[in-house]
Image: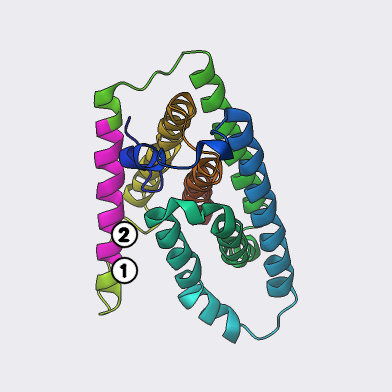
Amino acid sequence: MRTSNPALNDTVFVNSRTGNPADGVMTLNGTVFKTAVLTLLLVTAASWSWKLVAGENSPAWIGAAMKFGWILPFGIAMVIGFVPKTAPALAPVYALTKGILIGIVSAIFESLFHGIVLNAVMLTCGILFALLAAYSTGVIKPSENFKLGIFAATGGIALFYIASWALGMFGIQIPGLFGNGWVGIAFSGFVVVIAALNLVLDFDFIENGCASGAPKHMEWYAAFGLLVTLVWLYLEILRLLSKLRSRD
């Protein structure tokens, strides 16, 4: 088994099988339920921070939140990634803290492009259910080469974003790819496709994890990993739509 989602890697389910059998095993229904819980928490937190931004006259704290708000959810995600047994306790906290940041980002985009958030949410949900249906019916069956390709593409995108962030600290900007020109739009479209295909790998990995008899706490871990991919997909769709709308 292989997935390019760093939260759902090959060794996690293998290492987790040392858990107490009396605690139960991972099931697909349990994972779906916990994914729904985490999504609800994220949406609730996002709605709360959205309202704060919408009613805020001074943007000072908003800039600080955008600059440093990612640190806490990132730290929580790292702990969950290295210690999967913490997922039942920390995954909901991650969903809440990430939701606050998502709400701020979404409110800012909505203030610039009216209706863009609803479009991004609908596209994210549409892609999720379309790929789930395709995977469930066997239309898409990820081969090993397919998995390796998505893994390599995802890693390349992650390294590119990290390099861009590091260069930005020194005032160096990469032209074209982050702009609203056709090169920038094509790049965002490519990233959206890769993010979407990660969902297919996540479905496959979760199914295999359930079949292998992973312990019950891995339901929270798998739900957390799927939420990470969904948030990434939503943000990339939001970025792509903003580039397209800015050309109107």
Q: Position of residue 152 (x, y in %)?
A: 24, 40
Q: Is residue 118 left or right of residue 204?
A: right
Q: Hey, what amino acid is under mark 2? A: Tyr
> Majority secondary structure of the magenta segment?
helix
Q: Position of residue 120 (x, y in %)?
A: 59, 46
Q: Is residue 123 above or below residue 45?
A: above
Q: Please tell me how crowded label 1 is: few (under 14), some (14-19), or many (20+) other residues with Cα within 10 Å.
A: some
At mark 1, the secondary structure is helix
Q: Hey, what amino acid is under mark 1? A: Trp
* Picture residue at 63% right of the left edge, 45% below the top: 121
Question: Where does the magenta region start and end?
Answer: 148-164
Q: Is residue 240 above or below residue 201?
A: below
Q: Please tell me how crowded label 2 is: few (under 14), some (14-19), or many (20+) other residues with Cα within 10 Å.
A: few
Q: Position of residue 24 (x, y in %)?
A: 57, 35
* Pointer 2 residue: 161
In terms of image quadrants, where is residue 92? bottom right
Residue 214 appears in the rendering: yes
Task: Look at the numbered discs 1 and 2 and tell me whether their residues touch, using CB distance below 8 Å.
Answer: yes
Q: Is residue 56 above or below residue 23?
A: below
At mark 2, the secondary structure is helix
